[in-house]
Image: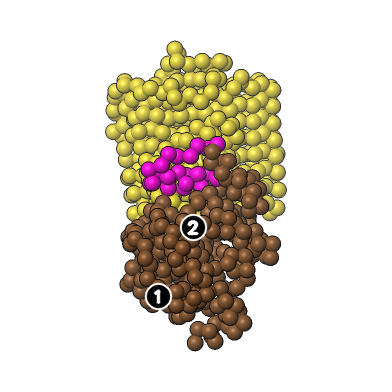
Chain colours: A yellow, B brown
Amino acid sequence: MLSLPTIREEAWRWADLAALPALAEASPQGSVPDVSHLWIGKGPRLLFIDGKLQASASRPDGIALGAVTATTDHALGAFANGKTGWTLSLGRDHAPSATIEIIHVGTGGASHLPARIALAEDAQASVVETFVGDGWANRLTAIDLASSARLMRAIRILSSSGFVSLREEAKVGENASLTATVLGLGGAGTRIDAAVSLTGEGAYGEVGGALLARGEQRHDAAVVIRHAAPLGTSRQLWRAVADDKATASMAARAEVARDAQKTDGEQSLRGLLLQRAATINLKPELEIFADDVKCAHGATVGELDANALFYLESRGLPPALAEALLTRAFVADAIGRIGDEAVRDAFSKDAEAWMEGAL
Amino acid sequence: MLQINNLHAEVDGKPILKGLTLAINPGEIHAIMGPNGAGKSTLAYTLGGRPGYEVTGGSVRFNPNAPYSGEGRSVGDAEQGSGLRRSTEDDGIDLLALEPHERAAAGLFLGFQYPVEIPGVSNVQFLREALNAQRKARGEEPLSAADFLKVARAQADALGLNLDMLKRPVNVGFSGGEKKRNEMVQMGIIDPKLAILDETDSGLDIDALRIVGEGINRIMRKPDKAVLLITHYQRLLDYVKPDFVHVLAGGRIVRSGGPELAHELEREGYTQVAA
């Protein structure tokens, strides 16, 4: 029997996990879609089908396979903890030859896959993950960044159906930096969880992204960034678009511990309703115990600007194109946080394709 | 080219246009002047099809391919130039039945009094999409990115705008004058048959006024095109010489005449002239 959190728990109030018990029992169908167009670069790559590595289609290049155990108490992450997964461990001043790409294909069953990313001092890496297919993909990623290490993460959820749940747990050391951008679209329900702890002085943590929902889909992101040391910087920039009767929810929390002075935090949560029957929930939260901090926060939900729509249409753009253009612009600053140009372009194209299908 | 008959329109249930009649032939430039609240902008938005501008009566026929006859250019003849003069051209299409983007594709351009800022959407990107949407609607081939940039650069140069500015988000960070010049760049790129320019002169300094005026002449002063200039002041008319001047007051045209009417208005004020 699957034990799941309920919406009575504050952190799960907008989650819709109702599909999970059935998905947990479902069997993989084994029909694998063609994913060749999803590879962005030519660097190290891993292809997982239903959570199992496809060695023939992968180039691990130093990424190890084996049991990954983290100290998590996360309700969904715990399902993956201790199972076989992947580990990227980089020594001091090391970096992979190029962006690491990981594609997760689901064929209808449930897969629980843990991962660890450990970067020693001054090491850096860029990791892109793509989710496609069906079923339940549940992931736990434990991240440990030593001083001045840099990790860039970009995750896109393009799955056709089912559910994708992600749990990221990160410790960011002195002057180290973690940036994570999530693009959620496609037909699956999602739950994106992250707990980032800025443990070293001058650490930088950024978790954000764009959630695009339509139909009766539900996207749900819950991110906590904790400033545990002074001079840290955090950024949480989320954009949500909801069409039809879909729901997109984003809870972003910044915690500033008593001695985390000179913290610079910023939260920007914005939602765009394409239909009145759609729902967007935003919850920006600040919990500050230090007295010398700067924490900007903003949360707004709105519709497309009627003035801008008419302006574009008066120049000859049909309404659907005008709406797509404005919606693209709305999510552009979230996707624009991705530093790697090829990755950013690929994610932008996915978002554009979603809009052209939606509008 | 444009035949407005007894047009009535309201905004938020409040009647603004109350029986406006006006005919514009190819090759003509008409100026509509009038006091605040006369319905000038309502006329522009109603012709452009802006949501919320409800037509409650009358008709507007638009014939972008109306032949140039030279008739009606007997400037100064108050009778000929009267807004009541019947058009001799084909009836054309029912403009009011078209969506805003269809009006654009048919050849109508609306120059905004307050051009809208659109963060995140680049000028060139949206203009190319707009132009190609228009071309597609007319059954024409799309313009390639390279060809489009060539056209855009030429128009930007002519209006004294840097092409780099056109790569920036639409009107964001532009001064009032730059926004108006950008409207003219857009008009030059789109190359419409009929331009309705709503207070294109407001917010312009003397130099910008001249540049914009020259732009209107260069782009629109052609035998197969026409312009409806909506303005508060006579000063733009020093650069763009109208063939006809109309006074709009209380939602209708109360007087029509040649360019000298603009000077009369400037001298004596709307109250006097419209009385």
Same chain for the residues at labels 1 and 2, yes or no?
Answer: yes
* Callout 2 secondary element: loop
Q: Which residues are magenta?
A: B124-146
- Say if A309 sits above or below B266 in the image: above
In the image, is A141 to the left or to the right of A4? Answer: right
Q: Which mark is residue B223?
A: 2
- Say if B155 sits above or below A98 in the image: below
Q: Is residue B102 magenta?
A: no
For the image, the number of numbered tags is 2
Residue at x 38% of width, y 46% of height? B137
In the image, is A34 to the left or to the right of B113? Answer: left
The answer to which of B263 and A200 lies nearer the viewer is B263
The answer to which of A299 and B93 lies nearer the viewer is B93
**Which residue in the structure is indicated by mark 1?**
B84
Residue B50, given in percent of the width and then of the height, sits at 42, 62
Q: Nearer the viewer, mark 1 or mark 2?
A: 2
Q: Mark 1 or mark 2: which comes first in sequence? A: 1
